[in-house]
Image (cartoon, rainbow, N blue to C red):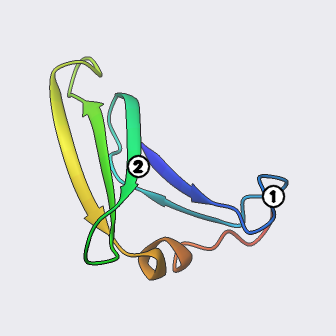
Amino acid sequence: MTVRLSYDGGKTWPAARQLCAGPSAYSCLTVLPDGRIGCLYERGVSSPYEMIAFARFTLDWVEQGKVVSP
Protein backbone atom coordinates (compact mmCIF):
# COMPACT_ATOMS: atom_id res chain seq x y z
CA MET A 1 0.00 0.00 0.00
CA THR A 2 1.56 3.25 -1.13
CA VAL A 3 0.32 6.77 -0.43
CA ARG A 4 1.04 9.19 -3.26
CA LEU A 5 0.81 12.98 -3.29
CA SER A 6 -0.03 15.30 -6.18
CA TYR A 7 0.17 19.08 -6.16
CA ASP A 8 -1.37 19.55 -9.62
CA GLY A 9 -4.71 17.77 -9.53
CA GLY A 10 -3.32 14.35 -10.39
CA LYS A 11 -1.17 15.22 -13.42
CA THR A 12 2.01 14.22 -11.59
CA TRP A 13 2.71 12.36 -8.34
CA PRO A 14 6.10 13.60 -7.07
CA ALA A 15 5.90 12.10 -3.56
CA ALA A 16 5.13 8.59 -2.36
CA ARG A 17 5.53 6.61 0.86
CA GLN A 18 4.86 2.94 1.47
CA LEU A 19 2.49 1.96 4.29
CA CYS A 20 2.62 -1.79 3.73
CA ALA A 21 5.00 -3.89 1.62
CA GLY A 22 2.76 -6.96 1.50
CA PRO A 23 -0.54 -7.62 -0.25
CA SER A 24 -3.08 -4.84 0.24
CA ALA A 25 -6.43 -3.79 -1.17
CA TYR A 26 -9.19 -1.20 -0.76
CA SER A 27 -8.25 1.94 1.14
CA CYS A 28 -9.89 5.12 2.32
CA LEU A 29 -8.13 8.37 3.34
CA THR A 30 -9.40 11.04 5.72
CA VAL A 31 -8.09 14.10 7.53
CA LEU A 32 -8.16 13.51 11.30
CA PRO A 33 -9.20 16.17 13.84
CA ASP A 34 -5.54 16.79 14.79
CA GLY A 35 -4.60 17.47 11.13
CA ARG A 36 -2.89 14.15 10.50
CA ILE A 37 -4.04 11.85 7.69
CA GLY A 38 -5.73 8.53 8.41
CA CYS A 39 -5.74 5.58 6.04
CA LEU A 40 -7.98 2.56 6.61
CA TYR A 41 -6.96 -0.32 4.34
CA GLU A 42 -7.05 -4.08 3.85
CA ARG A 43 -3.78 -5.99 4.19
CA GLY A 44 -2.33 -9.39 4.85
CA VAL A 45 0.60 -11.75 4.55
CA SER A 46 -0.72 -14.24 1.98
CA SER A 47 -3.79 -12.33 0.81
CA PRO A 48 -4.79 -8.67 0.94
CA TYR A 49 -8.02 -9.58 2.74
CA GLU A 50 -6.66 -11.05 5.99
CA MET A 51 -7.07 -7.96 8.19
CA ILE A 52 -7.99 -4.30 8.28
CA ALA A 53 -5.31 -1.80 9.28
CA PHE A 54 -5.39 1.88 10.19
CA ALA A 55 -2.36 4.13 9.72
CA ARG A 56 -1.91 7.73 10.87
CA PHE A 57 0.70 9.99 9.29
CA THR A 58 1.41 13.61 8.45
CA LEU A 59 1.59 15.33 5.11
CA ASP A 60 5.26 16.06 5.88
CA TRP A 61 5.91 12.31 6.19
CA VAL A 62 4.51 11.74 2.69
CA GLU A 63 6.49 14.68 1.30
CA GLN A 64 9.72 13.20 2.68
CA GLY A 65 9.25 10.35 0.21
CA LYS A 66 9.70 12.59 -2.84
CA VAL A 67 10.51 10.67 -6.00
CA VAL A 68 13.37 12.00 -8.13
CA SER A 69 11.68 11.32 -11.48
CA PRO A 70 7.96 11.04 -12.35
- Position in image of residue 45 (x %, y %): 20, 27
> Given contact means CB atoms under 8 Å apart, are the residues at marks 2 and 1 in contact?
no
Q: Residue at x 21, y 28 (%)?
A: 44
Q: Residue at x 63, y 74 (%)?
A: 66
Which residue position holds label 2?
Answer: 29
- Position in image of residue 40 (x %, y %): 28, 42
Q: Between residue 52 and residue 66, name the one nearer to us.
A: 52
Tell me: residue 61, above or below residue 42: below
Q: Is residue 53 left or right of residue 1?
A: left
Question: Between marks 2 and 1, how big is the CA–CA gap?
Answer: 19 Å
Could you classify mark 1 by the number of other residues whose Cα lies within 10 Å: few (under 14), some (14-19), or many (20 or more)? few
| Quadrant in the picture for residue 14 | bottom right
Which mark is first along the chain, 1 or 2? Answer: 1
Report the amino acid beneath label 2.
Answer: Leu
Report the amino acid beneath label 1.
Answer: Thr
Q: Is residue 17 left or right of residue 27?
A: right
| Quadrant in the picture for residue 46 | top left
Which residue position holds label 1?
Answer: 12
Count of residue discs? 2
| Quadrant in the picture for residue 56 | bottom left
- Position in image of residue 18 (x %, y %): 42, 55
Tell me: residue 46, above or below residue 8: above
